[in-house]
Image (spheres, helix red, strand yellow):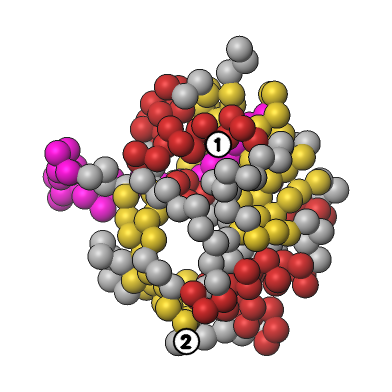
Amino acid sequence: MNYSLLSPDKDPMGAAIADYQKRGKASKLRVFSSFFDEDEIPVSQLFRSFGEMPPLEKTALQLATGKILDCGAGSGCHSLALQNMGKEVKAIDISPLSVETMQRRGVKQASQINLFDNHFIEKFDTILMLMNGSGIIGKLAYMPLFFNKMKQILNPGGCIYMDSSDLRYLFEEEDGSIAIDLAGDYYGEVDFQMQYKQIKGEPFDWLYIDFQTLKLYATQSGFTVELIEEGEHYDYLARLSLLSD
């Protein structure tokens, strides 16, 4: 589990976001992984308006109520959309440059906070974990720690809206069967590293989790899980609600 914050010299995504905010363009935000070929993130997509967001994100923002926490808020596009709806939202990110950008863009509450910091115990009615929001959990083994944290910061009757993707399609054979090593690590555990210009971040773990596995861990931790909506690319939006005592 990652409990740390980033510094500006190890913050490639934040540097790309800050550049785009200042200049209206950015260089390549490169992404490396031992699982995939080198890729890049189109920085402009991190600044999308509500109308440009995929359906799963729009649904989550429309359903969010009460005091809302936007986790891994990036450029603040979700928080700004929520503010435009008249909703109360606090945006957090481990990236200092992203937080500075959010503040410049008009996000009213934006702070450099790690969700898993033991000192972060503020209470919320809705917690948003969007753009493959399960990723920040890192590994399947950390799911119980994640749900314990959610219990600390969720108000009674509160819920989490999380989107993720099922990577099983990467293992499909021509006959439609799935070739996954059940004795190995969970197939949704991926490592990434980013680079923007000369700024290279540290490698980090990222978790894509299929809905049935999410439901299993959530139920074991005292949460109910609903499949709210499915996307076109093995992605989905789930609502996780804490069962009453």
Q: Secondary structure at mark 2?
A: loop
Instruction: Tell me if mark 1 has few (under 14), some (14-19) or many (20+) residues whose alpha carbon lies within 10 angstroms of its own.
Output: some
Return the x and y of residue 15 as percentages of the image width and height: 57, 78
Q: Nearer the viewer, mark 1 or mark 2?
A: 1
Residue range corresponding to the magenta coloring: 158-184
The residue tagged 2 is 197
Vertical placement of residue 36 versus 69, above or below: below
Q: Secondary structure at mark 1?
A: helix
Q: Is residue 59 visible?
A: no
Q: Please state which amino acid type lies under the numbered disc 1.
A: Lys
Q: Which comes sooner in the sequence, label 1 or label 2? A: 1
Return the x and y of residue 115 as percentages of the image width and height: 58, 48
The residue tagged 1 is 149
Q: Please state which amino acid type lies under the numbered disc 2.
A: Lys
Residue at far front of view: 119
Instruction: Report which quarter residue 124 is drawn in.
Output: top right
Quarter of the rendering occupied by the C terminus: top right
Direction from residue 154 to residue 197 in the image, left or right: left
Return the x and y of residue 70 as percentages of the image width and height: 66, 50
Q: Residue at x 52, y 79 (%)?
A: 9
Return the x and y of residue 217 as percentages of the image width and height: 40, 29
Direction from residue 85 to residue 46 in the image, left or right: left
Number of labelled discs?
2
Q: Residue at x 58, y 18 (%)?
A: 243
Q: Is residue 205 visible?
A: yes
Q: Which mark is residue 136?
A: none
Nearest the viewer among 29 and 168 is: 29
